[in-house]
């Protein structure tokens, strides 16, 4: 009985929409993996296929940094930033322990500083966007 009601609700001419931005999905729903407007992963394979997975993770990071709405997002991004800082310090130390003619290879220092700088930049962006979100709520 319930199935009949559901099948009556289904319209053959209904247009599938993106669950994130509500834009109509163009193309075959079973083939399209990303929304054409907001690039949200909408296909079942977007999180599994190795290549598409990169873009699906990029969407999640972009959303976390540009429009954080919960404190748990700050904690998650802060944890990742701490890991990057730790990784940058390890990279610089690895350069120290692989001295070439008594000199620390510059690439280790540059890579370590790049990781530490990226961590602080991402943390600064996500905290500023979260503060902006909170000020809009008031
Ligand atoms: Zn969308």
Image (cartoon, rainbow, N blue to C red):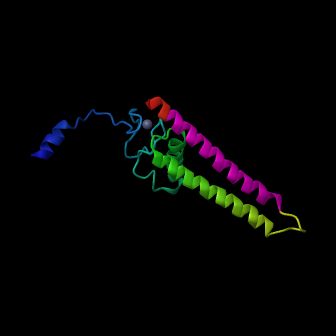
Please report the residue visible at 47 percent of the width from the left and 36 percent of the height from the top.
36
Residue at the outermost front position: 138
Please report the residue visible at 80 percent of the width from the left and 69 percent of the height from the top.
98
Total tally of numbered discs in the picture: 0
The range drawn in magenta is 105-133
Q: Position of residue 63 (x, y in %)?
A: 50, 42
**Quadrant of picture, ligand 1:** top left
Residue at the outermost right position: 101
Determine if the magenta segment contains residue 10. Answer: no
Determine if the magenta segment contains residue 119. Answer: yes
Q: Position of residue 35 (x, y in %)?
A: 45, 39
Depicted 8 relative to depicted 116: above or below: above
Q: Position of residue 11 (x, y in %)?
A: 23, 35
Relative horizontal placement of residue 129, taking residue 21 as reference (left or right):
right
Quadrant location of the C terminus?
A: top left
Q: Position of residue 127 (x, y in %)?
A: 56, 41
Q: Looking at the picture, tell me which residue is in the foreground, 11 or 93.
A: 93
Please report the residue visible at 84 percent of the width from the left and 63 percent of the height from the top.
104
Relative horizontal placement of residue 107, taking residue 88 as reference (left or right):
right
Q: Main secondary structure of the magenta part?
A: helix
């Amino acid at each position: 009985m319930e199935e009949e009601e559901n099948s009556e609700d289904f319209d053959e001419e209904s247009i599938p929409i993106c669950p994130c931005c509500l834009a109509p999905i163009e193309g075959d729903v079973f083939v399209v993996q990303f929304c054409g407007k907001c690039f949200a992963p909408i296909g079942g394979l977007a999180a599994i296929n190795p290549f598409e997975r990169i873009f699906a993770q990029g969407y999640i990071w972009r959303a976390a940094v540009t429009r954080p709405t919960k404190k748990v997002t700050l904690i998650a991004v802060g944890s990742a930033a701490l890991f990057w800082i730790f990784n940058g310090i390890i990279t610089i130390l690895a350069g120290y322990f692989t001295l070439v003619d008594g000199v620390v290879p510059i690439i280790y220092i540059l890579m370590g500083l790049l990781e530490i700088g990226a961590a602080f930049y991402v943390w600064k962006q996500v905290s500023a966007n979260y503060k902006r979100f909170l000020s809009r709520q008031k």
